Image (tube, grey):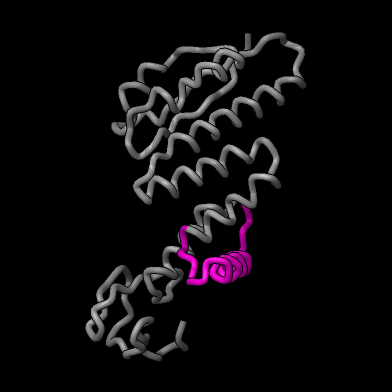
Amino acid sequence: MPPFGEKPSCPYCGATLESRPTRKKKCPHCGSYMFVRGGEVVTDEEAAIRDWLDAVAEFAITRDEFDRKREELSGRFGTRASVNDTAWGLLNALVGRVDGSTLPHVYWQMARLVSEEGKDPKPYLREAARQQLLSLRNSGARFSSGARFVQVFNCNDPWVCSGCRALEGKRWTFDEALLRMPIPDSCTEPSGCRCWYSELPE
């Protein structure tokens, strides 16, 4: 951010701006879209990086880690790695490091990335659901109440598809859910299933 009283400049062409943008705006000099993050005028790519780091804040990935991974991938690819390629590399590295309760969140973020690229998110959503079931079942080993069950919960909004809405109120044992995988396999929402499991007592 420039010193107080100093006019901001376009992050692309460096031209001085008459006023500080407060939201997405096209530069009057070069025509590129500028974005505002944390009070700072940034490029679309910089905004995408900051937005992604905010979205995965639970993993405590720092900007330095992002930049190092991007440099590493760029050297391997022979060209500058994209924001999504770098994000994917960081998420992939987490798979072998995080515990079972965190692993579903890694796969959910992977699903979001592939969905943004127009690819099918279901394989990653399926793995997220499987890991969540395994984590819930393992945590249930601490209890002595006998067999436990799971139920699917959805976001209860207009974007819940008919397939997921039909699951409301149904319950399965862990083994049944792992075999049938009702989520995400019942989902017909193109952008991806947003449902999750919750454990129920016997």
Q: Of helix, strand and loop, which mostly describes the magenta segment?
A: helix
Q: Position of residue 54 (x, y in %)?
A: 51, 57
Q: Which segment is the magenta one?
A: 59-84
Q: How many marks?
A: 0
Query: Which image quarter holds the C terminus?
Result: top right
Query: Magenta stretch: residue 81 in it?
Result: yes
Q: Is residue 162 above or below residue 17?
A: above
* Residue drawn at x 30%, y 68% as measured from the top left: 24
Foreground pick, 62 / 157: 62
* Residue drawn at x 48%, y 64% as measured from the top left: 50
Q: Position of residue 65 (x, y in %)?
A: 63, 65
Q: Is residue 160 left or right of residue 179?
A: left
Q: Position of residue 2 (x, y in %)?
A: 45, 86
* Residue drawn at x 64%, y 13% as measured from the top left: 148
Query: Magenta stretch: residue 29 in it?
Result: no
Q: Quadrant of residue 200?
A: top right
* Residue drawn at x 67%, y 9% as measured from the top left: 147
Q: Quadrant of residue 32?
A: bottom left
Q: Is residue 194 above or below residue 166?
A: below
Q: Position of residue 163 (x, y in %)?
A: 34, 21
Q: Is residue 37 left or right of residue 108?
A: left
Q: Is residue 43 left or right of residue 61?
A: left
Foreground pick, 83 / 21: 83
